[in-house]
Image (tube, rainbow, N blue to C red):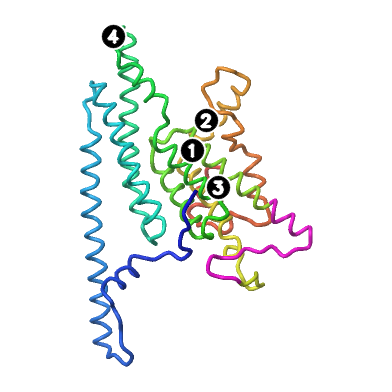
């Protein structure tokens, strides 16, 4: 189970203020205010430079621990194992620190590097095993290699975890859930080593959640109830002055994430779904169940044509690129 998360995230600026006790007394002169602002900026820059240095050291450690010779099966296996060991430690840090700190998106590239290195190692294991099978030189280590080949890459487990958190309505309010879906969209869209099946599964999951959400809203409307969406920091009911993007923030975040993924990976995702659908009756199909990767046009028409107008409330650049793809 997920441990409770704080509903209000703290920025690096707030953290630096806490660390250094920056305060401005009442009646301070403009020069004093300027000096304080400069000191604060210096402290923030110092923290940023320190973080850059730490991340550089961590990258170097990840690369060193997952290095292998392209022709060495044992080294490739060890690289994959080392990547999984590091992930067990980094995953806990991600849960406790990264997801609860504002403007920490760049830290995701630690996982970007780690998962990419592990994926390279797994591909090398598969390639070298195929080569050995052709040469009839499989030895006692075959069982261990087979076990490693049957394991999903780390990026699949990471993506599934983010989706599970997003689906969990008790996960400390809307803000952390919005954060994880943003991480999901940013990571999957940029990591080209993420397979098309995983891309389709992520998009289909976001569409499925959005469909359930609008269905629930329509049900409440039919029953004469006012749809309520409470933010993590407010206990007030919906007022007529609130904008739809504020009231239904999680819904619009989910939709934009789906649009965003399509902008980057839409062509290969659509092709994968079409192949899966064409082979739906083939028991030996190499593709996933079409229902689990359903990103068909009828789902997009339903969502984009709904009165909540998700395209209207997403970034213009995302909207234009998505419409171009459509």
- Which residue range is magenta in the image? 215-235
Mark 1: secondary structure: helix
Q: Earlier in the sequence, mark 1 or mark 4?
A: 4
* Residue for point 62% across, 63% down: 229
> Real-space Cα distance between discs 3 and 1?
19 Å
Q: Which residue is mark 4?
A: 137
Q: CA distance from mark 4 to mark 2?
A: 35 Å
Res 11 quadrant in image: bottom left
Residue at the spot x=52%, y=31% of the render?
Answer: 271
Helix, strand, or loop for circle 4?
loop
**Which label lies toward us, 4 or 2?**
4
In this figure, which residue is indicated by the disc labeled 1? 199
Q: Which mark is residue 272?
A: 2
- CA gap, disc 1 and disc 4: 36 Å
Task: Locate the C terminus and report the quarter of the image it occupies.
Answer: top right
Residue 139 at x, y = what percent? 29, 11
| Residue identifier under label 3 | 323
Mark 3 in CB contact with mark 4 (< 8 angstroms): no
């Amino acid at each position: 189970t997920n441990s409770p998360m704080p509903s209000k995230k703290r920025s690096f600026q707030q953290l630096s203020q806490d660390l250094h006790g920056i305060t401005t007394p009442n009646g301070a002169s403009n020069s004093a205010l300027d000096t304080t602002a400069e000191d604060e900026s210096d402290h923030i820059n110092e923290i940023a430079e320190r973080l850059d240095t730490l991340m550089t050291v961590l990258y170097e450690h990840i690369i060193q621990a997952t290095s292998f010779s392209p022709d060495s099966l044992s080294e490739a296996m060890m690289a994959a194992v080392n990547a999984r060991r590091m992930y067990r430690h980094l995953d806990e840090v991600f849960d406790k620190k990264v997801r609860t700190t504002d403007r920490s998106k760049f830290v995701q590239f630690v996982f970007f590097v780690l998962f990419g290195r592990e994926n390279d190692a797994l591909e090398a294991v598969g390639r070298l095993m195929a080569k050995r099978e052709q040469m009839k030189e499989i030895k006692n280590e075959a069982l261990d290699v087979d076990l490693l080949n049957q394991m999903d890459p780390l990026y699949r487990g990471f993506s599934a975890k983010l989706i599970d958190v997003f689906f969990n309505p008790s996960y400390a309010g809307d803000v952390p859930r919005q954060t994880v879906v943003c991480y999901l969209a940013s990571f999957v869209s940029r990591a080209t080593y993420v397979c098309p099946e995983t891309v389709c599964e992520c998009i289909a999951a976001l569409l499925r959640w959005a469909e359930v959400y609008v269905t629930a809203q329509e049900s409440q409307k039919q029953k004469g109830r006012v749809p309520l969406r409470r933010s993590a920091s407010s206990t007030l009911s919906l007022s007529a002055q609130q904008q739809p993007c504020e009231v239904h923030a999680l819904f619009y975040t989910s939709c934009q994430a789906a649009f965003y993924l399509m902008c980057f990976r839409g062509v290969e995702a659509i092709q994968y779904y079409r192949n899966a659908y064409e082979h739906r009756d083939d028991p030996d199909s190499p593709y996933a169940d079409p229902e689990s990767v359903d990103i068909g046009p009828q789902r997009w028409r339903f969502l984009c044509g709904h009165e909540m107008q998700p395209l209207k409330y997403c970034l213009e650049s995302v909207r234009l690129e998505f419409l171009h793809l459509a």
